[in-house]
Amino acid sequence: MKDAQDIVMRLNEILETESFNVVAFKELLNQFKEEFRPKVKLLDFKYYNNYRRKFAKKAKIKCIGIQDFEGAAKFRELEKDCISFISLRSYYNITKSSFYHDTNYLFYFYFGTANNDKIIKKFIAPLIKKNSMITDNETNKVYFSELLKTNSDYEEAYNDIKRVLDKYKIDYEFLKGTKDIWARDYMPVQKDVGSFVQFRYEPYYLKDQLEFQSDPKVICVAHNLNPVISN
């Protein structure tokens, strides 16, 4: 049995070879899968970048201006995803395409700049679809801040959302201890069944308004969640 880091090192070497050796790449990847049973996760830093963040922010503001709140929510999600990727890239000093092994995951940091980036991305795409983290359409319950129900400012929005969820028999629950309604900003990300990861929540736009900054630790304790805390 080869060491996991040895195989990862060889995979990274193949990323930059002048001629892509399909057989060697497949053998290494299959060997890694058989011996370590990892879930493969693609982090697309080429797509989620600062340029796209700025675009999403402008588009969000434009949508709000014309009262297209559905469009604003979509671009807000894209902006938040870009910020997460930019922060992750900066914190771990990720500067180029590479494979990285951590516990039960094989991460592929994709920048689109390595010699064989594009072809390797196509090769691992089926693995990513099969083994990706839990996505929104795979969840079985929707969580909202309790403020959506108790604050009269959101009464109309709450009634509209409740009507749709009840119509389609979608299970939902309310989070106690929140200070604002944007739960996706501060709640942990679901990684697997019963497994969550909590990212640091210290938004710059609330640094002087702490009364509006929700504390994820308090909320998680109230709901018996024990997420892994990300650095």
Image (cartoon, rainbow, N blue to C red):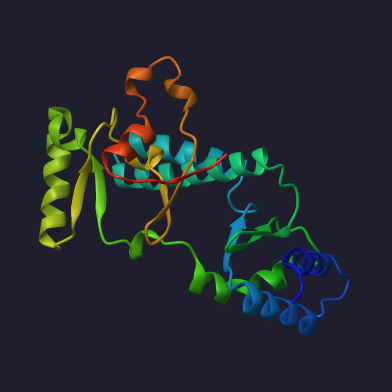
Q: Specify the farthest residue to the front.
A: 1
Q: Quadrant of the N terminus?
A: bottom right
Q: Specify the farthest residue to the right.
A: 18
Is 75 above or below relative to 216? below
Q: Residue 24, how many percent across, how many down?
A: 80, 81
Q: Residue 84, how many percent across, how many down?
A: 53, 43
Q: Residue at x 28, y 35 (%)?
A: 181
Q: Quadrant of the C terminus?
A: top right
Rendered image quadrant of residue 188: top left
Q: Residue 66, how many percent across, how many down?
A: 32, 37
154 left or right of 49? left
Is 188 above or below relative to 182? below
Rendered image quadrant of residue 42: bottom right
Q: Residue at x 49, y 40 (%)?
A: 199
Rendered image quadrant of residue 41: bottom right
Please tell me which residue lies in front, 221 or 212: 221
Q: Residue at x 24, y 43 (%)?
A: 144
Please tell me which residue lies in front, 18 or 4: 4
Is 203 above or below relative to 117? above
Is 208 above or below relative to 39? above
Q: Specify the farthest residue to the bottom.
A: 23
165 left or right of 9? left
Q: Residue at x 13, y 32 (%)?
A: 150
Please tell me which residue lies in front, 149 or 200: 200
